[in-house]
Amino acid sequence: MKDTIKELKTFMILWSTQSLSQLGSTMTNFALTLWLYQKTGSALQTALLSICSYAPYVVLSIFAGALSDRWDKKKTMLVCDTLAACCSVAVFVLLKTDSLAPVHLYLLNAVNGLMNTVQQPAGDVAMTLITPKEYYQKTSGLRSLSNSVITILNPVLATAVFAFAGLEAVIYTDLATFGVAFCSLLFLVKIPDISGETSEKESFWQAVKTGLAYLEKNRLILWLILFLAGVNLVASAFDAVLPAYVLPRANGGEKVLGAVTSCAGIAMLVGSLITTLLPAPKNRIRVIYITMLISLGTENFVLAFSKTPLVWCAAQIIGWLLVPVMSANLDVILRTTIPVDMQGRVYSCRNTLQFFTIPVGFFFGGLFVDELCEPVMAAAPADGILQALFGSGKGAGAAMMMFILGVVGVGICLYFRGVLRKFTYRE
């Protein structure tokens, strides 16, 4: 046990402090979602926050990976974190001067997304460099664990602080956690250099092409990425729909949204603990598609047809329990298959291909609720089948959209199940 702690000391410092900073950032994001929905009452305008954050991430990720493999990982992370913190400061200043408007949030979220685009591949490679190979599954479980805790705590803490002390206090918390993470990375963490001269000899454009060429040759990795792109399409649309589903209902509101969101984190926490304790499965590919079929094939349908917060919470637990299991198995396949000196480039290509569907999902999720599902449900007869299935009043259209997402999610999982069964993977 002592040897394990010693070998993972650097990982534990970086993981814990970056997770703390992530908690502060997600609290700000959640509070801004509440603030914007209060101002606009629109699912689409609220979803635009996430769209603006992910758009630069998707468009520029391929180039960011080539830069990440050539740049010092620690310096890259420090600079990106600092500029992201400056965005929080800008929100605070605009708020204090009574000048904050939705357009400001969209622009600042775009800058945040750009910083995350460059920082994430550097952080992913850094985690690989400071982690012994035999601990990949355990550390992946720990990273899922921290993400779960953040998912649990951020809506609860953000809602509480936002309600009692306002958006300014949420931003103070965000900046304090940034300070802890920045100082820890600067003074306590040493990230080894990558041995090898490949990235030094390659031109920038050659480095970009190398990442794409790797995926072209390694079809298992490519198909896994495309499968997760489909999953992300449904999941991001779900995230856009959920506030419009919970907030306007008589038995909903901000506190219920926070509770429902936290239940996803509780489920991921349990799933992360299970992942950390489980032995390596015989077939990691099979685990990946089966877990997602269970998740997407239950949560959306349960939410579509239920009308009580307790059932909403139960649906979140069912839908998110197996996500860490999927993530850990995917992470092991990627880290053991992709050479470490290429991971920045390949991960960034993955980010573009796997996550380009997230802004698309947020946009269409919000658009369909506002422009299609809610008008259809508002015009539906009181004694008709639609109101019998999805209810009435504002929020019923979001319930209809949940049903549509359930159908799409199951279809995606069944299609890729047929494709991925053709591949084998050996560690």
Image (tube, rainbow, N blue to C red):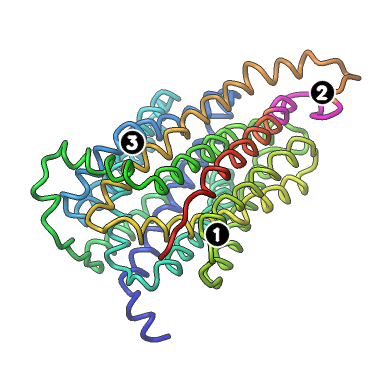
- Single out the mark in the foreground, 3 or 1: 1
Closer to the camera, 13 or 143?
Answer: 143
* Of pointers 3 and 1, the one earlier in the residue sequence: 3
Image location (x, y in percent) of residue 246: 69, 36
User: What residue is shown at x 54% (from left), y 57% (from top)?
Assistant: 324
Image location (x, y in percent) of residue 138: 45, 69
Count of numbered circles in the view: 3
Residue 397 on the magenta segment: yes
Q: Using residue 130 as the reference point, say whether residue 399 is left or right of it.
A: right
Q: In the rendering, which numbered label is found on residue 325?
A: 1
Q: Using residue 359 as the reference point, say whether residue 156 is left or right of it.
A: right
Q: State whether residue 356 is above or below residue 339.
A: above
Q: Majority secondary structure of the magenta segment?
A: helix
Residue under label 2, please give it.
386
- Single out the mark in the foreground, 3 or 2: 2
The quadrant of the image that shows the N terminus is bottom left
Residue type (three-letter) at the residue carrying disc 1: Val
Q: Using residue 201 as the reference point, say whether residue 35 is left or right of it.
A: right
Range shown magenta = 388-400
Q: Secondary structure at mark 2?
A: helix
Image location (x, y in percent) of residue 53: 40, 34
Residue type (three-letter) at the residue carrying disc 2: Leu
